[in-house]
Amino acid sequence: MRPLFIRRARQLVTLAGSSAAPLVREKMNDLQIIENGSVWIERGVIIAVGPDDELAHRFADRIGEADVIDARGKTVTPGLIDPHTHLVYAGSREHEWTMRLRGATYMEIMNAGGGIHATTKATREASEEMLYEESKRRLDLFLLHGVTTVEAKSGYGLSFEGEIKQLEVAKRLHDTHPVDVVSTFLGAHAVPPEWKDDRDGYIRLIMEVMIPEVSRRGLAEFNDVFCERGVFTPDEARRILEAGKAHGLTPKIHADEIEPYGGAELAAEVGAISADHLLRASDEGLRRMAERGVIGVLLPGTAFFLMTQAADARRLIDNGVPVALATDCNPGSSPTVSLPLVMSLACLHMRMTPAEALAAATINAAHAIGRSHVIGSLEPGKKADLAIFNAANYMQIMYYYGVNHTEMVIKDGKIVVNEGKVCI
Ligand SMILES: N=CN[C@@H](CCC(=O)O)C(=O)O
Ligand SMILES: [Zn+2]
């Protein structure tokens, strides 16, 4: 494999120096930008990052053996990282969207057997092959938007076989697709209809059968619960998350999305790596999250698509909670793969600065999935995962909202998107 030399980026956004701890408060605005910057890559790893003249001098006698990418006029960033998706599912729910547009609420639709239950039915019925193909198409689209790593949750199987099938598909996608897929077990996404009259039986199935087997097979690193009134209570969530911990699965929580429910407090109590959604989190919950270093993963695309007030990102940032951003890609509340659009929404609906949004979708997102030592910034020794945007500066990636500026994506040192097309 020839070395790769990316040269003379108008802005090379490195986010260097934050691998040990996520960026918080004002530090989220410090992107460590190099003007006219270059990157030298060998065998999939970043070897050097710096001003072009410095690197041209250092590698002068090796430039001839390298593939050179001219990034003049472009903005180069770490590959974007999406730390909250429901990537693997079958079917779609546009008819429910129409019902919501006519006034039905998300929870009403779910309680009437639609929502998560509808996607669970479709996902259970899909063959592993169909599930793989549908999810692979979505993963291609993520890549085309500059995303090189996604977290992917199960939670549409809601049975032993169904959950394992989803996680197996996620693993196969990770093994076969350039985008890295990091798996989270979400057996506690909803109580499936067949367990309606014995919810404790379902919770015990999760704790005593699913979690041990998911862990034994190495199918997930994280364990998540949809902790919301009418779904799983904080006490139930605590039991499930503690059971996961006992089997080496790190907790994550869907917390305080629809009403204040103690999810943020629980995230801090169990030592979750992240608490996600947080639209209605209490001040006390956020204070405890900041104290324990729990990342707040915010999902402004979900609030936008559910037509509700977005999370108060400023309140999180001012309280010292490290913030990451994600698409929440799923067929019910956020059917998008565009992390750049989510970054625009973070600015427009949550008043994050473009710098904060980019930090939240790179290094802080890496922290939210326990990968900050390998991805999320452009530094020697890290994976060579980069996105090249047809934008004169990082702000334009978000300012021209709804436009996909991704021109090239480098994954593990290989060009996998060129001129806006997947070229694997
Ligand atoms: N809130 C719960 N889970 C998903 C939605 C899943 C669905 O509607 O299918 C979310 O994060 O928004
Ligand atoms: Zn979710």
Image (cartoon, grey):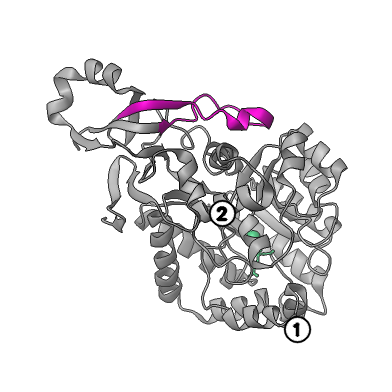
Does dot 2 land on a helix, a strand or a loop? helix
In the rendered structure, the answer to whether residue 271 lies left or right of residue 211 reads right
Question: Percent position (x, y) of residue 70?
Answer: 24, 36
Question: Which residue lies at the image location 73% right of the left edge and 80% below the top edge?
Answer: 109
Q: Tell me which amino acid carries mark 1.
A: Ala
Question: Percent position (x, y) of residue 23?
Answer: 62, 31
Q: Nearer the viewer, mark 2 or mark 1?
A: 2
Question: Which residue lies at the image location 87% right of the left edge and 41% below the top edge?
Answer: 284
Local packing at callout 1 (Cα closer than 10 Å; few below 14, some 14-19, many 20+) is: few
Question: Percent position (x, y) of residue 276?
Answer: 69, 51
Q: Which residues are magenta?
A: 12-39
Q: Tell me which amino acid carries mark 2.
A: Val
Q: Label 1: which residue?
A: 112
User: Residue 317 sits in which quadrant?
Assistant: top right
Query: How far is mark 2 from mark 1, CA to CA?
Result: 29 Å
Q: Label 2: which residue?
A: 342
- In the picture, the disc for residue 144 is none
Question: Percent position (x, y) of residue 176?
Answer: 35, 57
- Nearest to N terminus: mark 2 or mark 1: 1
Relative height, residue 382 to residue 286 (above, below)? above
